[in-house]
Amino acid sequence: MLKLHNYFRSSTSTRLRAALKVKGLDYEYLSYALLKGENRGADYLAKNPAGLVPSLELDDGTVLTQSLAIIEWLEEMHPQPALLPADPIGRARVRSLSYMIACEVHPLNNLRVLQHVEGQFGGDKAEWFRHWVGVTFEALEAALAGSSDTGVYCHGDSPTMADLCLYAQVWNNKRFEVDMSPYPTVTRIFEALDALPEFVAAAPPNQPDAV
């Protein structure tokens, strides 16, 4: 069985949990409390030297890291249900929407950055978080609302990799009390995803280590 090294509140972990659920793949849930530094233990660092979650450990002991790279691997190994469109332009659009969150919002708002902002500079980490969400979500809302390729979900009427990223990020936004009223399309898509059993099962509050 696959082993998922993750943390309930980690948005990158939420992305991957949702991908595994959509693909119908079972996994062993292994939790690391990031606030306690459990991801910095020697055993885990031997698997993932960066000490980040999630990691996906395969039956042969191979450890895959970085959530989007793992999702792309899942897509190659388990192509149905598809998380990327069949056409090259569609795939490029889904990747672009995914990267807006994964490469523009998350690197500025992950736990270690927020801790550094607060500890090193005495900044308000919640205000920092909300600022950088707003910078990208304004563009994300425009990209989704302004495209005929947007359907029930980010691209068409079945969830894609972009929806995995959107769903996970909005859960983080809830925790930091981000005002979502400027983003009605994003909110509509999140609500549609949050009605799917696979996404509900991946949501942070529904994990065994949720506190």
Image (cartoon, rainbow, N blue to C red):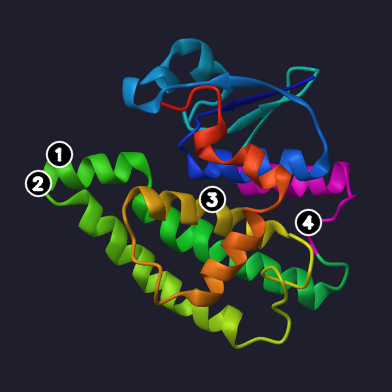
| Residue situated furthest left in the rendering | 122
Q: Identity of the amino acid at label 3? A: Ala
Q: Earlier in the sequence, mark 3 or mark 4?
A: 4
Q: Residue at x 35, y 70 (%)?
A: 134
Where does label 1 land, which residue? 119
Between 9 and 62, the residue placed more toward the observer is 9
Q: Identity of the amino acid at label 1? A: Gly
Q: Residue at x 42, y 77 (%)?
A: 138
Q: Residue at x 39, y 52 (%)?
A: 174
Where does label 4 land, which residue? 83
Rounded to the nearest angstrom, the CA distance separating label 1 from label 4 is: 39 Å
Please report contact status of discs 1 and 4: CB closer than 8 Å, yes or no. Answer: no
Q: Magenta residues, as a range? A: 66-84
Q: Of discs 3 and 4, which sits in the foreground? A: 3
Q: Residue at x 30, y 61 (%)?
A: 130
Rounded to the nearest angstrom, the CA distance separating label 1 from label 3 is: 26 Å
Rounded to the nearest angstrom, the CA distance separating label 2 from label 4 is: 41 Å
Please report contact status of discs 2 and 4: CB closer than 8 Å, yes or no. Answer: no
Where does label 2 land, which residue? 122
Query: Looking at the image, is 90 positioned above or below residue 52?
Result: below
Q: Earlier in the sequence, mark 3 or mark 2?
A: 2
Where does label 3 land, which residue? 168
